[in-house]
Structure formats: structure tokens, C-alpha cells
């Protein structure tokens, strides 16, 4: 269920400036979105897994904070990122 190294490298190279740019806000949001999507799929199967649901809510809050930061600093980057990731807002 966790992100594989290969998938993480793909996300970093797609959203970062280079393959070592893992601290970029866009990369962090993309990684969190991937984890959120995986956990959402898990919870569709295991409806009573409340521990995972709690972790999912923490990740969503963390992503929300990063999105708010990006919105304040770079509104165009924010708009393109939510379109690219398919996040409703």
C-alpha cells in the first residue's frame, strides 16, 4: 500500500524541477494526493477501518495547509496544480 520508490521518483520528476527536488511544494502536494487516493481506495473496501480514516484526515489537513500556502504565494501555480491533480476546489 505505501508508495513504491519508482512511483515516488516518477511523481518527483513530473512535478519537481529535477529528480532530486522532493522539497518543492508542488511535489509534496502531489505525493500527499497519491497517498490520499491510495487510502481512499483502501477505505472503500474496508469501511470500518477507523485508524486508517484518522490517518487519511491528517493527510488531507496537511495537504490543505500546503495548498493554502501555494495559493498565497503563487496563485497561477496553484490553479495549474489542482487541474493537473484533479483536485476539486
Image (cartoon, grey):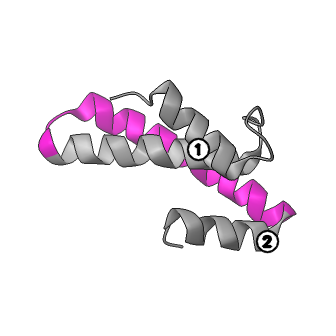
- Judged by depth in the image, the label closer to the viewer, 2 or 1, is 1
Task: Name which residue lies at 65% across and 50% down.
Answer: 14
* Viewer-proximal residue among 50 and 78: 78
Measured as percent of width and height from the top left, residue 16 is found at 74, 46
Residue at point 26%, 47% (across, down): 41
Residue 62 seen in the current view: no
Q: Quadrant of residue 62?
A: top right
Q: Residue at x 30, y 47 (%)?
A: 40
| Front residue of this view, candidates 15 and 32 | 15
Q: Which span of residues is magenta-colored?
A: 45-73
The image shows residue 78 at horizontal and vertical percentages of 71, 66
Q: Which residue is mark 1?
A: 11
Secondary structure under badge 2? helix
Q: Position of residue 49 (x, y in %)?
A: 20, 33
Residue at 78%, 41% in the rendered image: 18
Q: Is residue 48 left or right of residue 69?
A: left
Amino acid at each position: 500500500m505505501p508508495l513504491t520508490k519508482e512511483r515516488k521518483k516518477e511523481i518527483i520528476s513530473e512535478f519537481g524541477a529535477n529528480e532530486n527536488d522532493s522539497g518543492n511544494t508542488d511535489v509534496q502536494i502531489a505525493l500527499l494526493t497519491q497517498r490520499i487516493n491510495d487510502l481512499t481506495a483502501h477505505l472503500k473496501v474496508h469501511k470500518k477501518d477507523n485508524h486508517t480514516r484518522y490517518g487519511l484526515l491528517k493527510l488531507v489537513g496537511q495537504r490543505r495547509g500546503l495548498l493554502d500556502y501555494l495559493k498565497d504565494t503563487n496563485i497561477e501555480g496553484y490553479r495549474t496544480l489542482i487541474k493537473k491533480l484533479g483536485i476539486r476546489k
